[in-house]
Image: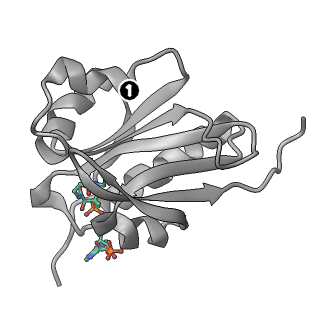
C-alpha cells in the first residue's frame, strides 16, 4: 500500500500563498493583482500544508457576508489549491479542516464559497451544500455557490 507523507498544516502569510495560487488557479494574473482580494480590510487568515518545507496546499478564509444568507459572522473560503503533484492524498481536506477550526475561534456561523464545478465532490465531502444556479466566471469557468453552517454553540 502506498504511504502518504503527513504534512505540517499551519497558518501562513498571504504573500506565501501567491505563487501556488497563481500556478494552480490563475496563471493569467500577476502576483500583486492576485493578492488584492485576499488582503483587504476584512479579517482573514491563510492556511498552508507543507511537506519537507515545500508549500503544497493552500486555502484562504475571509470574513465576508454573502447576502444570500441571513447569518451573522459569515466567512468566505477562497483560493483553495493543491499542487498537482500532491493531489488526492487528503492534503486539501486537512487544510480546509484546519481553516474550520480557526473560523470557529471567531464564532463563525457559516462558511461559503464559489466553487469550480470540478471541485464539487471535494467540497461536498467536507460538508458543503450547493445552492442556486451555476454561474459562469469570465476567467475561470462555471462555478457553484456552496455553504456549510456551523452550530451556534457559543455564548453571546
Ligand atoms: C480541489 C483540490 C484543491 C483538492 O485538493 P486535494 O489535496 O487533492 O484534496 P484531497 O486529497 O483532500 O481530496 C481530493 C480527492 O482525493 C481523495 N483522497 C483523499 N485522501 C486520499 C488518499 N489518502 N488516497 C486516495 N485518495 C484520497 C478524496 O476522496 C477526494 O476525492 P473527491 O474530490 O472525489 O471527493 C485540488 O484538486 C486542486 O487544487 N484543484 C485545482 C484547483 C481547484 O479547482 N481549486 C478549487 C477552486 S474552487
Q: Is residue 71 left or right of residue 24?
A: right
**Is 132 situated above or below 14?**
below
Q: Which residue sits at x=68%, y=41%?
A: 108
Residue 122 visible somewhere in the drawing: yes
Give the quadrant of residue 131: bottom right
Q: Which residue sits at x=49%, y=54%?
A: 97
> Residue tagged by mark 1?
38
Q: Which residue sits at x=20%, y=17%?
A: 32
Query: Where does residue 65 sit, x and y in percent of width and height?
Result: 62, 36
Mark 1: is the Cβ under 8 angstroms from ligand 1?
Answer: no
Q: Is residue 13 left or right of residue 52?
A: right
Helix, strand, or loop for circle 1?
A: helix
Image quadrant occupied by the N terminus: bottom left
Q: Is residue 56 left or right of residue 44?
A: left
Query: Where does residue 139 sit, x and y in percent of width and height?
Result: 20, 44
**Is 108 situated above or below 149?**
above
Q: Ligand 1 is located in which of the four quadrants?
A: bottom left
The foreground one among 142 and 57 is 142
Q: Which residue sits at x=15%, y=32%?
A: 19
Amino acid at each position: 500500500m502506498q504511504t502518504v507523507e503527513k504534512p505540517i498544516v499551519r497558518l501562513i502569510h498571504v504573500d506565501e500563498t501567491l505563487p501556488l495560487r497563481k500556478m494552480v488557479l490563475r496563471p493569467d494574473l500577476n502576483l500583486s493583482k492576485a493578492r488584492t482580494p485576499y488582503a483587504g480590510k476584512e479579517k482573514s487568515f491563510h492556511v498552508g500544508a507543507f511537506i519537507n518545507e515545500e508549500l503544497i496546499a493552500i486555502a484562504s478564509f475571509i470574513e465576508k457576508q454573502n447576502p444570500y444568507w441571513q447569518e451573522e459572522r459569515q466567512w468566505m473560503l477562497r483560493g483553495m489549491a493543491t499542487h498537482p503533484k500532491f493531489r488526492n492524498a487528503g492534503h486539501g481536506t486537512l487544510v480546509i479542516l484546519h481553516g474550520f477550526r480557526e473560523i470557529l475561534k471567531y464564532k463563525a456561523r457559516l462558511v461559503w464559497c464559489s466553487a469550480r464545478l470540478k471541485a464539487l465532490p471535494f467540497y461536498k465531502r467536507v460538508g458543503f451544500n450547493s445552492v442556486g444556479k451555476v454561474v459562469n466566471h469570465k476567467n475561470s469557468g462555471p462555478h457553484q455557490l456552496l455553504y456549510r453552517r456551523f452550530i451556534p454553540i457559543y455564548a453571546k
